Amino acid sequence: QPVLTQPPSVSGASGQRVLISCTGNSSNIGAGYDVQWYQQFPGTAPKLLIYGNVNRPSGVPDRFSGSKSGTSASLAITGLQTDDEADYYCQSHDRSVKGVVFGGGTKLTVL
Amino acid sequence: EVQLVESGGAMVQPGGSLRLSCAASGFTFGNNAMSWVRQAPGKGLEWVSSISGSGATKNYAGSVKGRVTVSRDNSRNTLYLQMNSLRGDDTALYYCATQLGGYLTNWFDPWGQGTLVTVPS
C-alpha cells in the first residue's frame, strides 16, 4: 500500500484544467518534506515534472504547476492536451520509513 | 548528454541472485547520489535503495533490506544492485536514477530505461 495517496484516475476535456491530489501525513509531507511529481507514458521511464513542490525543470511547460499545503500536495494541469494522457506520480520522503515514498499513481484521461 | 543505461536483468529462480548495473555518462558521477526504483508489471513506482556520491551512506526500503546491497564504482561511473534471496514480488522493471536535492527535498532526474527482473512465483 503506497504511503502517499493519489486518486487512481482523473479525466478532463481537452483545453480544461485538472487537479491531481497527493495526500500524506505528519511523517512525510506534513513533516516539511518537499513533493515531486513525475509523468510516465506507457513503456517509458518516468520523467521529472515538478520538484521542490513548485519548481519546473527546464523544458516542462508552464501548463504544469505544483502546490503543497499541510499534509497534501496537488499537481495542476491547465489547457489539457491529448499528449498529456499519462500516469502521474507524486514522491516525497518519509521519516518513519526512513526513505523515499511514492504515491500509487494517477492515470489521466483527456476526453 | 546525461545518460543512464541499466543492464543485468534476467529471469531468476526463487532464492537466486542477480547483480544489476547502471552505467552513467555525461555528468560527474561521483558528485551525485544515485538510486534504484522499481516498478512491478502494471503497478506503481517503489523506491528500492539510495547511495551517496562517495558510497559511504546507503539506504534501503524495508521490503528489500537484508537481501539487497547497493554499491558504486566511481572510477567506472557505474552503480550496482546486488540482489539475493529473490522472491516473486521482486519481479519488476528496475530503474536507476540520479538523486538530486538535499535536506527535506530529493528528486530523481534523469532515469535510465530500466532492466527487467523476473522471478517466477
Image (tube, rainbow, N blue to C red):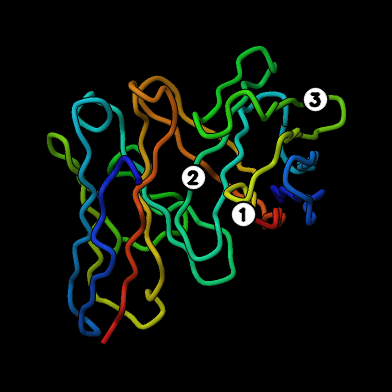
- Asked whether residue B36 is in view, the answer is yes
Q: Are marks 1 and 2 on the same chain?
A: yes
- Pointer 1 with pointer 2, Cβ within 8 A: yes
The one nearer the camera, B121 or A111, is B121
Residue at image point 51% right, 57% down = A46
Q: Chain of mark 3?
A: B
Between disc 1 and disc 3, the foreground one is 1
Quadrant assignment, res A64: bottom left
Q: Quadrant of residue B24?
A: top right
Which residue is labeled 1 in the image? B92
Quadrant of the image occupied by residue A20: bottom left
Question: Under tag 1, what secondary structure?
Answer: strand
Gap in angstroms between the C-alphas marked 1 and 3 = 26 Å
Mark nearer the N terminus (3 vs 2)? 2
Residue B66 or A18: which is nearer the viewer?
A: B66
**Residue identified by numbered label 2:** B46
What kind of element bears circle 2?
strand
- State left or right for residue B45 relative to residue B10: left
Query: Which residue is painted at 22% across and 38% down in the image?
Result: A24
